[in-house]
Amino acid sequence: MVKPAQSSKTDIETTWQTIEAGLRQILRHPSENLELDIKRYMCLYTAIHNFCTVRNAGSIETEQGKAGRKRGEAYLLGKELYDRLKQSLIEHVQGIQDEARRLPNERLLGFYTEKWDRYTTAAKYNNHLFKYLNRTWVKREIQEGKKDIHDVYMLHLVVWKEMEVATVHEDVEDALAQLGETRQNGFDQGIIP
């Protein structure tokens, strides 16, 4: 179980490890996590809350915000959590790309359809799990006009778009062309589930 908010950078790292383990589990197998027991859910939710609200984190410094007001540790920890979440999503999508590179074109469309379904299910689940971050840090950043900050669900979609669409566009086009040709010739191999 996650302890209440701690005060050292080491505790922040430990809390992040708890969050990251849950995040990876949800991203890999979101349908299994829809039935996540309440104890595990509350442990992760509490870890996220603690990460955002920890005080006196040794090496965390304040910075000037918009209109000259000081942004304290809670701001910086919200940003740090958001950045770490984004990096974890990028790494997850890179893993999907690596897996896709090993597939023949005829399996690529089905693969991406399955991965997209899993990913968007995980995005919905994570959006609920990260409600505290959305209600506090993300909301404030959006109100201040930050265009590159999104709620957790939208962050998932943006990362997918930036990573997948930019890098696999040609492969998917080739797979679609091949599928069209196959269907035109009267062969439907059930490529798309």
Image (cartoon, grey):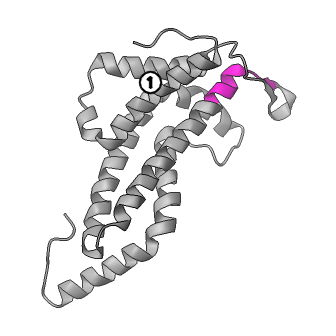
Which one is nearer the viewer's eye here, 185 or 66?
185
Place of residue 135 in the rendered image (x, y in percent of width and height, measured from the top left): 55, 27
- Residue 38, image quadrant: top left
Could you tell me which quadrant the N terminus lies in? Answer: top left
Could you tell me which quadrant the C terminus lies in? Answer: bottom left
From this view, report whether residue 186 is shown above or below residue 128.
Answer: below
Q: Is residue 185 left or right of residue 127?
A: left
Place of residue 131 in the rendered image (x, y in percent of width and height, measured from the top left): 48, 28
Tag 1: amino acid = Thr
Question: Can the viewer see residue 124?
Answer: yes
From this view, report whether residue 118 is shown above or below residue 17.
Answer: below
* Residue 95 highlighted magenta (yes or no): no
Q: Is residue 30 left or right of residue 183?
A: right
Q: How dense is the environment of label 1, judged by Cα within 10 Å: few (below 14), some, or many (20 and up)?
A: some
* Residue in the image at 45% along x and 72% along y: 169
Task: Please give the range of residues in magenta.
Answer: 70-78
* Residue in the image at 62% along x and 43% along y: 149
Taken as a whole, is the magenta stretch helix, strand or loop?
A: helix
Q: Which residue is mark 1?
A: 18
Place of residue 158 in the rendered image (x, y in percent of width and height, measured from the top left): 52, 52
Please count the marks in the image. Answer: 1
Which one is nearer the viewer's eye here, 176 or 103?
103
* Residue in the image at 71% along x and 20% along y: 73
* Residue in the image at 30% along x and 68% along y: 103
Place of residue 68 in the rendered image (x, y in percent of width and height, measured from the top left): 87, 30
* Residue 73 highlighted magenta (yes or no): yes
Question: Can the viewer see residue 154?
Answer: no
